[in-house]
Image: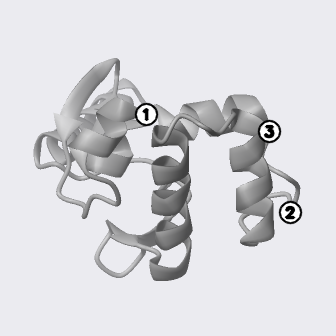
Amino acid sequence: MDSLAENTKRGLRQKVRRGEYPCLAPIGYINDVRTKTVIVDKKKSDVIRRAFELYAKNDSRLENISNFLVQNNILSSGGKRIKKDRISFILSNPFYYGHFRYADEIYEGKHQPVVSKKIFDKV
């Protein structure tokens, strides 16, 4: 049983080193089951990028971003409004500029970024 756990961990580490995200894709992305990669969700990624841009202008609060996402039909997986703490997680997630966090380290991902590093840093 131990070797199965070890093999799984080793497989995930290899995937991460190749720049492949080993978890569920964040809002604005889709897990492609055929290629086992993360691809951009064209409709949602556009709204997420605009949310980043809105917040970067400094005149929006997390609540405004939550309202903006609701107006654009982006809801939590349970079909509810996305709460402020979740929005702050989204806005601080390096995944959106092409990197990802795994086991407390940041890796460069192979997925397509939704926002530029410049906008991400501003947020």
Callout 2: 10 Å neighbours few (<14), some, many (20+)? few
Indicate the amino acid at tag 2: Gly
Callout 3: 10 Å neighbours few (<14), some, many (20+)? some
Q: Are marks 1 and 3 in contact (CB under 8 Å)?
A: no
Secondary structure under badge 1? loop
Q: Quadrant of residue 42?
A: bottom left
Q: Position of residue 121 (x, y in %)?
A: 31, 31
Indicate the amino acid at tag 1: Val
Callout 1: 10 Å neighbours few (<14), some, many (20+)? some
* Above or below 31: residue 6: above
**Circle 1 residue:** 123
The structure residue drawn at horizontal position 35% and vertical position 71%, both measured from the top left corner, is: 39
Q: Quadrant of the N terminus?
A: top left
**Circle 2 residue:** 79
* Above or below 114: residue 95: above
* Above or below 96: residue 32: below
Q: Does residue 82 appear in the picture of this structure?
A: yes
The structure residue drawn at horizontal position 45% and vertical position 60%, both measured from the top left corner, is: 49
Secondary structure under badge 3? loop
Q: Which mark is residue 83?
A: 3
Quick check: 80 left or right of 55? right
Quick check: 75 left or right of 42? right
Q: Which mark is residue 1?
A: none
Q: Quadrant of residue 3?
A: top left
